[in-house]
Structures are given as C-alpha cells and as structure tokens.
Image: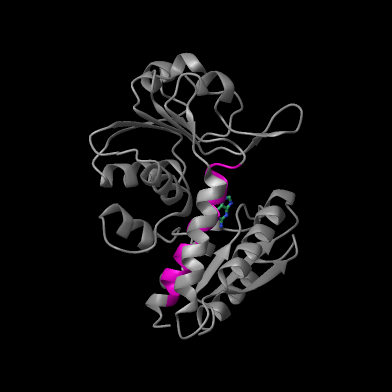
Amino acid sequence: MDAVVIDGKALAAKVKEEVREKAARLTQKPGLAVIIVGDNPASRVYVNGKKKDCEECGFYSEEHALPEYASQQELLALIEGLNGREDIDGILVQLPLPKQFDERAVLRAIRPDKDVDCFHPFNVGKLMIGEEGFLPCTPAGVMRMLREYGVDVSGKHCVVVGRSNIVGKPQAILMLRENATVTICHSRTPNLAEECRTADILVAAVGKVGLITADMVKQGAVVIDVAMNRNEQGKLCGDVCYAEVASKASHITPVPGGVGPMTRAMLMENTLYAAQSHGK
Ligand code: GUN
C-alpha cells in the first residue's frame, strides 16, 4: 500500500492563516528584516518567499540586499541598527554568506530576542535544556507535520541522517524532548542502511540525491525528507528515492511541497512570537 503523503504546502497555509489571525489582534504589526548578501540564486528564491509569507500574515517586512563584496563591518553595522529598532521584531541573515564573512560572529550579533532563525548560541542553549523560546524553523516544521498527521513521537525510535546545526542536531533534540529514542547518523556512520532500517521515524537531512533507498526503510516507517537537491535533470528533489520508499512507508513527505513550506511557516510563527515577547 502506498504511504500517506504529508502535504506540507496545505499545512503551511493553515499555519500561516492561524498566524495572520493572531497577528491581527496585536497592537502593532510584527516586523521582519531579511538580510541577503550577494546574488546566490537559491537564496534569492528563499528571500522572495519569505517576503510573500510576511504579506500573507499581515507582517511588516523589509529586505536589505548587500553586494557580494560587502564587508563584515558593514553587515554588523546593519544588524546593530536593526537590533535597536522597535518596529523590527525579527532579523534573519540568509545563509550561506560569501566567504569573507565570519558567519558565527554574524549570527551572534543578532539580538537573541530577535533571532527568529534560532541560530544564536543563547537560543540554541535554551533549546538544549528545554526552556521556552524560539524553535529552529525546519525541525519545528517537521514536528508540526508529525503532530498534524497523528504520528506520536513518544517512545519511537527516530533516526536522523545528517548532523548540521540548522537541521540534524536541533531535529534530534526536538524529538528527544518529545520522548523519542534518537540516533543521529552522518558521513562516518559505518552501516547507514542498517541504522536506518531500525527507524520508526526516519529524517533525511543530508543533501545527497538518491541516498535513502527502499531497502533502508522499515515497512510502515514514517519518512521525512528535509533535503532540497537538484537531480541530473535539474529537477528539485530530496534525499529519498520517493516512489520506491512511498510503497513501503506509512507516511512520506514530498519534495517539493513537504518540509520546505513548513520551514517558512515556522519562521512566521517565530516572528509572531518575537512580536508578542516585545509587548505588541
Ligand atoms: N539557508 C538555508 N536554510 C536557511 C535557514 O533556515 N535560515 C537562514 N537564515 N538561511 C538559510
């Protein structure tokens, strides 16, 4: 039997509608500043999407586009200015930054109460010890999808493939927080297929076309594909061999139309949360 397809696009629309209703009840619009440096075409697509999301949610948004050759000082000065502005609740620096930037220093410069990406060490620390605060957008989107489709994480074995700071690590923490037993796999894991086969819930977040094949998936497992790759034909695809895995999984997320739209919706939730925490 074919898996239930988790419709991230439809769920994201529902989340954004909820955010819009809540934002309309605030005394002032939530405000998001998005910073893009250089002309990475993928980053441009993401930033345009975020702008559209803000419009849909009734937020104020502004974009700051710096040239490819901008300096660290310029970027830090821009962030400093946004940190001090009352109308801006969230600041997002689109990654990756061009090579001359010290990404860690840039992310630390964002005031933690405006860090809607949840990349600042202060917020990552709070996440780690289970304190309330921002949640990282992609992992939070995955958790929301699981909840909405009635997949209980508690007591399950979750295998996360990938250990990035943006997805793999925080994904594992959120699953642990909901009482899963979690395994994190990565490029040095000796027997990836064997580890994956033990998963009740498998999250692929590597960025490698065709990485997860049907023989790596347990019958009836839930398969979440976080990756956003281009295949040889230039088509968007994830890490999971979709058709063959869909005939074995109980639930599966498509690429595109799965995790991606949910990541953006969670950014809107975080921006709303920031506005609320600023007393709006
Ligand atoms: N680049 C790829 N994913 C992300 C993300 O979630 N946030 C930011 N700021 N940049 C990204």
Q: What type of secondary structure mainly makes up the magenta span?
A: helix
Q: Position of residue 87 (x, y in %)?
A: 54, 83
Q: Identify the magenta region.
A: 257-275
**At x 56% / y 37%, what residue is drawn?**
227
Question: Image height check: is 34 above or below 218?
Answer: below
177 left or right of 33? Answer: left
Q: Position of residue 197 (x, y in %)?
A: 38, 19
194 left or right of 53? Answer: left
Residue extending furthest toward the top: 215
**At x 55% / y 41%, what residue is drawn?**
258
Q: Nearer the viewer, residue 218 or 110?
A: 218
How many marks do you count on the picture? Answer: 0
Which image quadrant for residue 74? bottom right
Q: Is residue 236 visible?
A: yes
Quadrant assignment for the C terminus: bottom left
Q: Position of residue 101 (x, y in %)?
A: 62, 58
Q: Is residue 62 magenta?
A: no
